[in-house]
Amino acid sequence: MRDYDYPAKNTVRDAWMRFLPEFFQDTQAHGLYLPGHQNLEFPCYEQKRLSKDRLIGIEHDPSRFAAVKRKANGIRLIHGNVRDAVCEIEQQHIPRLRFANLDFEGLYSRLISEILSLFRVFPSTSGGYLCVTSFSSRDEETLLQGMIHTSKFYSGRAERTEFMSDYGRMVNRYVALKHILKDPRASDHSHLTRELGFLWWMTLVMGVMQFPGDTYGIIDEAYLTELDAILERIDERSRARSEGTLDFHLVYDTELATRMCAHTSCLWPSGFQHFIYYTAPGLPMHVWMLKIDFINTKKKPSHQDVLEQVWQFATRTPLIYVDKMGTAHSLV
């Protein structure tokens, strides 16, 4: 089984623990994570005053489940994926989660599907912390999706005059990273397009989720249907412009900004960090950490405000590259 105790991974794990509160004061605070057969995070959560009965672990691989269970230290362990854990939380009437730390090494579509399902039970009324680790694949569909999602940010913003300079700032980070890694396989856009895809889905879900009281989240189907038609147009136009080439193209749809400006959100992103590191076998991994506030006042931000906040985080938060020795390098 894979070893998760190596310098780069340990540095990122330490960063996640610093991203979380020093202590969880709420006695109903619950968290979800993937303990693996080593369960290296468990002592850290205990130090944050999270007892084992408020920690939920997931293991989907039946061949590893017994080994994971042996090191579970009494936490609630679910055999399945994130969606299975969400169903278990709902069926057992467990309070909505204060944090979730998820690790995906498979298909990008699976990552997005499972994260979106998580928001039925996340965040709690006290807010939440999300950490997502994803294999940074370079497949063409992922790159195309990244370009499409970039066009969605472009279309959704109220002000677009500095968009390309902001985008250029992000590209420059990854150009610098490519030079550090001496990796000729990675294009200047490959890691970035995946990041913008992930951040778009986070932006979307923060706008379409509703939380009636302390109950679990539901999707605002009417609003999502309105957005779907606009997003489908952006998708079709982007694919048409990119047909036969991977050149970078932006498309603009005026209606997206109009709809997002008119819709309010009860979720607000208030903190962000992002990392790149390589696993011990040499696979590139991307890590995103988001702090999400729950807004329960009458005055709420617009969905466009949420998009703008995410965009500001993406463009102005230094990217941290963690080398194989566990040393962090800041790329501004």
Image: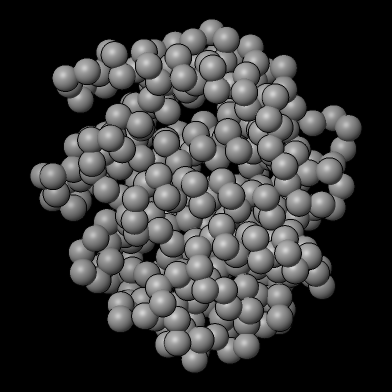
- Quarter occupied by the C terminus: top left
Residue at coordinates 38% horizontally, 25% vertically from top-left?
Answer: 148
Left or right: 201 with respect to 10? Answer: right
Residue 222 in sight from this viewpoint:
yes
Residue at coordinates 21% horizontally, 69% vertically from top-left?
Answer: 281
Q: Where in the figure is residue 27, as x and y percent of width and height? A: 82, 72
Total numbered badges shown on the rendered structure = 0
Q: Where in the figure is residue 154, as x and y percent of width and height? A: 47, 19
Q: Where in the figure is residue 104, as x and y percent of width and height? A: 40, 58
- Residue 186's quadrant in the figure? top left
Image position of 323 with respect to 173: above or below: below
Q: Residue furthest left?
A: 184
- Quarter occupied by the N terminus: bottom left
Left or right: 9 with respect to 177? Answer: right
Image position of 238 with respect to 312: above or below: above
Residue 176 in sight from this viewpoint:
no
Residue at coordinates 80% horizontally, 69% vertically from top-left?
Answer: 28
Residue at coordinates 43% horizontally, 17% vertically from top-left?
Answer: 234
Q: Nearer the viewer, residue 147 or 45?
A: 147
Left or right: 258 with respect to 285? Answer: right
Q: Where in the figure is residue 206, as x and y percent of width and height? A: 64, 38
- Residue 38's quadrant in the figure? bottom left
Q: Nearer the viewer, residue 78 or 316?
A: 78
